[in-house]
Image (spheres, rainbow, N blue to C red):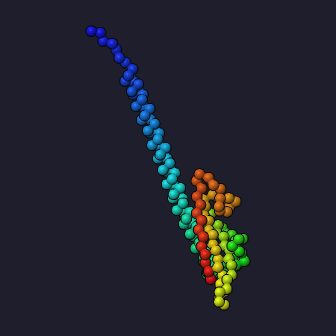
Amino acid sequence: MCRERQSGFGIATAIFLLLVLGSLTAYLVTLTGTREKASVLDLQGVRAYQAARAGVEWGAYQLLRDSAGAYATACDGASYAAPTRQNLSGLAGSLGSFTVSVECGSASFTETSNSFQVYQLRVTACNAPAAGVCPGTVGPAYVERQLQVVISR
């Protein structure tokens, strides 16, 4: 009886398995990195929304409680088409990296001898402002939220 040596089949199988396992590992590492980036951007989106809410609250306070102040006076003279703009600064904590631009326009109305002023606030919060103003420069980590509010007094 003659036995022939068979060699090489085991090594080919081992190389194939190593390639499959390596590809699977690379895919899982890429998937994990993508999920991590998505989570960070989602958190930044929530922060941008909260910064925009802070801008709405600030603008409403300026118009309703400090109606003789500089911002309310400037807003009274601005139209919807050409609003006045001011950046809100001084946000602390996790919102400190956001710039908030508050635009305000107004119009006067009279209805059955009652006159009132209607204000439109457009608040934009972003993490990468262009020339210090939102909306900013769009990039892979750019996050922006915009809120609009109508107030009358």
Image location (x, y in percent) of residue 64: 61, 80
Question: 143 and 96: which one is in front?
Answer: 143
Q: Residue at x 43, y 34 (%)?
A: 20
Q: Residue furthest front?
A: 112
Q: Quadrant of residue 120?
A: bottom right
In the displayed structure image, the side of residue 31 where residue 82 appears, left or right: right
Estimate the x, y position of residue 125 in percent, counting from the top left: 60, 64
Is residue 68 something one can see in this rendering?
Answer: no
The number of discs equals 0
Q: Nearer the viewer, residue 20 or 56?
A: 20
Q: Quadrant of the C terminus?
A: bottom right
* Location of residue 116 with respect to 81 vertically, above or below: below
Residue 152, image x, y percentages = 62, 80
Looking at the image, which residue is at 38% across and 22% down?
9
Q: Is residue 19 above or below residue 77?
A: above
Q: Residue 25: where, in percent of width, then height?
A: 44, 39
Q: Of 93 and 122, which appears nearest the observer? A: 122
Residue located farthest toward the bottom when viewing the structure as drawn: 113
Name the residue located 39 percent from the left edge and 28 percent from the top edge.
Answer: 14
In the picture, which quadrant includes the N terminus? top left
Res. 28 in view = yes
Relative height, residue 15 to residue 142 (above, below): above
Left/right placement of residue 107 relative to residue 50 reads: right
Quarter of the image where one finds residue 85? bottom right
Q: Which residue lies most toward the left here?
A: 1
Residue found at x 65% / y 56%:
137
